[in-house]
Image (spheres, rainbow, N blue to C red):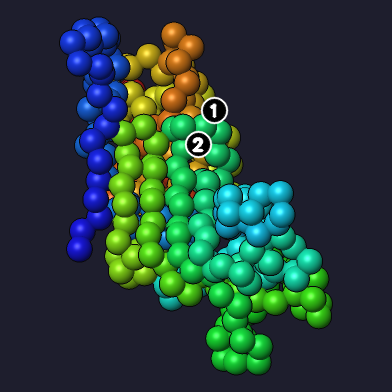
Amino acid sequence: MAEKQERGHQPPAGSAAPEVAPEVMMLRQHQSNIVRMSFPEECRTLLRTSRYGVLSTLSHSSDSQGFPMGSIVGFADDMATGAPVFSFSTMSGHTQDLIADGRASLTVTAPGFEGAADARVCVTGTVERVPVDTQEWATVKGRYLTVHPDAFWATFGDFSFWKMSKVISIRFVGGFARAGNIPPKLFAEAQPDPVAAHCGPHIAFANAHGDRAMCAVIRHQVGADVGVVAAKAMSADKHGLILSAVRSSGEQFKMRLAFPGGPVKTPQQVYESIVHMFALAQEGASK
């Protein structure tokens, strides 16, 4: 079963499409052709690189019974399947909701989420308490405390470990005109990006080059000056850098730059690819 991708936003019927500047068209064309992770990979990576999300449960409190209730909770991803795991106190309202009805969803946003251009995923399924002193309990406990090493309270007597044991749907939105429903089987089989969670120092290294050098890389990769006057790397994955860029018109948007040698597998290769990226831009500018 393949992931279901949806068409982008369309103008109202009968309305004239706004005129688009040639440099904007070039930039859009470049971005549409750039290599990205598959939707299942992006979803697994979002869960791997995030630590908190919004858990929506069916409320059983007297004043909101039967209505969805959202709570910000810490979570970790099961290493094998990506299913979210949690540590909940019996005093929490969402815990009481889950005891009564395990149906829930977890919404997770990309690190540094700012708005509609940034990625998010909603994982829906049944959340159940993990039986104490079982192998699964030890695995879930170990994974949760690895992701949340300061959560000393997770081992208190009124806390227990939970897992979305049955994932029934995954809804992914990767920004404008990038959305789809991911079959649970493809989600479980996909692998998180191998470098996305380990690139902090290399992102800082890229940004230390400054706007002028970053804009030169954009011109080199797009093949023309597309009016970008400032750009900052926000994150990275095996395919390249994700930037927040600003055009001379004041328009701010997200874009990608590809690593020159193709996908990487290690953080060290991320560093080497960034060095190569700036070197190629400098070489191209000198010709």
Q: Can residue 103 be seen in this view?
A: yes
Task: Determine whether the residue tagged by mark 2 lies in a helix, strand or loop.
Answer: strand
Amino acid type, residue under disc 1 in the picture: Gly
Q: Is residue 143 visible?
A: no
In the displayed structure image, the side of residue 98 where residue 13 appears, left or right: left
**Label placed on residue 210:** 1
Task: Determine whether the residue tagged by mark 1 lies in a helix, strand or loop.
Answer: helix
Quadrant the N terminus occupies: bottom left
Q: Nearer the viewer, mark 2 or mark 1?
A: 2
Depicted 16 relative to depicted 115: above or below:
above
Which quadrant of the figure has residue 149? bottom right
Return the x and y of residue 42 as percentages of the image width and height: 39, 53
Going 50% across and 36% down the picture, which residue do you hit? 233
Give the camera-side residue of 259 and 13: 13
Q: Which of marks 2 and 1 is nearer the N terminus?
A: 1
Going 60% across and 92% down the picture, which residue do you hit? 134
